[in-house]
Image (cartoon, grey):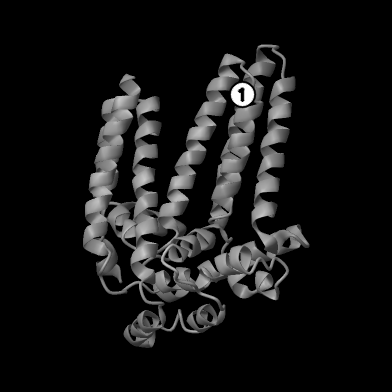
Amino acid sequence: MLFVRRLSAAAALSVALFGLNFAVMRAKPLTEIDEAAWVFSSYFYHLAFEKRDLRSADWRSPDALDHPPLAKYLVGAALATGGIRVDSLEPKRWWASRDLDFLDLEVFTRECARRLPSGALPRARLLSSLAMTASGIALFALIAAALAPAAGFIGLLLFGLSPIARTVAGQAVSDGIFFFLFLACALAQAAWLRRAESRASLRAVSALLGASCGLVFLTKLNGLLCLAASGVVFVLVLARRLRRREPTGELWIASAIILGVFALTVVALNPSLHSRPWGFLCDMFEHRWRRVELQTAVLYPQALPTPELRLSYALRSLFFTEDWFFATVR
């Protein structure tokens, strides 16, 4: 009962933090071109759930290569609640033809805003805000279980006041969805580890963990790291049991369930993988790698020449949106 009250208090705090943020951000004009990109990509919701065309050539298009479809589905569903529909891939093709042309970025941004369906941006931003609100609750649960409830509240407060968290919550992008699913996967991993250490049955929680890893991966390709982290935990638990000469059969069954449910979730929810799944996945990773290299060359040609500096800038930007060091070397 005490945990329920604390969780309710954390939920209220998260709602207050991100609800106020949404009230400020919902009606702001479009300034981030990625917001338009995700609205335009919500076409895949229309293709999958309204047209129910799982064999369209669009499932093999460059946009399908660029990102997995889960966030596109969710943005499309959010728009559909207001009768808003993106029924063609043409707006995203137009966007992709110009997104790295920064010579006329202001003109491009205004044109993106003009092409957005009326009312689409507030609804997509609401989805992002709700995802970040849920992320705050999940973050509290994770920290409170690992450390203490007080630490959970402090972590939630810092998260809710972080400039990057507030920015993401107020934009129609996939990051909030990804972060919530990432935290949900971490909670599933923690539950799996607790059951493994208590030698309880792992089958149900293994299925949950496999599905969680699959959903994170279906949002962004780097979500595959969640499955890799689960593999590391499995190896550590296996090594401990082998060292103590304890039975390991249940662990091997659990690993098969995790991998099986992960693969089933990823393939079932992404029609791009219904044919030649391995080849298409390889194409996705190659496309994303080239895309990141191109974006880095365009956005950070001098300021961030090494991975260490890029990581340093990313960590600093969690708390300081105006990075004086980055601005200086730029």
Q: Quadrant of the N terminus?
A: top left
In this view, the residue in front, 232 or 113, is: 113
**Which residue occupies the extreme right position in the image?**
276
Q: Horizontal placement of 80 versus 221: left or right?
A: left
- Crowdedness of circle 1 by 10 Å Cα count: few (<14), some, many (20+)? some
- Residue in the picture at 70% in, 47% down: 264
Give the answer, above or below, for where 305 lies relative to 103. above
Residue under numbered circle 1: 237
Q: Give the image location of residue 256, x and y in percent.
A: 73, 34
Q: Amino acid at mark 1?
A: Val
Q: Residue at x 35, y 58 (%)?
A: 126
Nearer-the-camera pick, 298 or 202? 202
Quick check: 225 left or right of 79? Answer: right
Please name whichever residue, 117 or 215, is drawn nearer the observer in this view of the structure. 117
Determine whether the residue tagged by mark 1 lies in a helix, strand or loop. helix
The quarter of the picture where the C terminus appears is: bottom left
Expressed as whole percent of the image width and height from the top left, the position of residue 97 reads 52, 84
Position above or below: 127 against 327: above
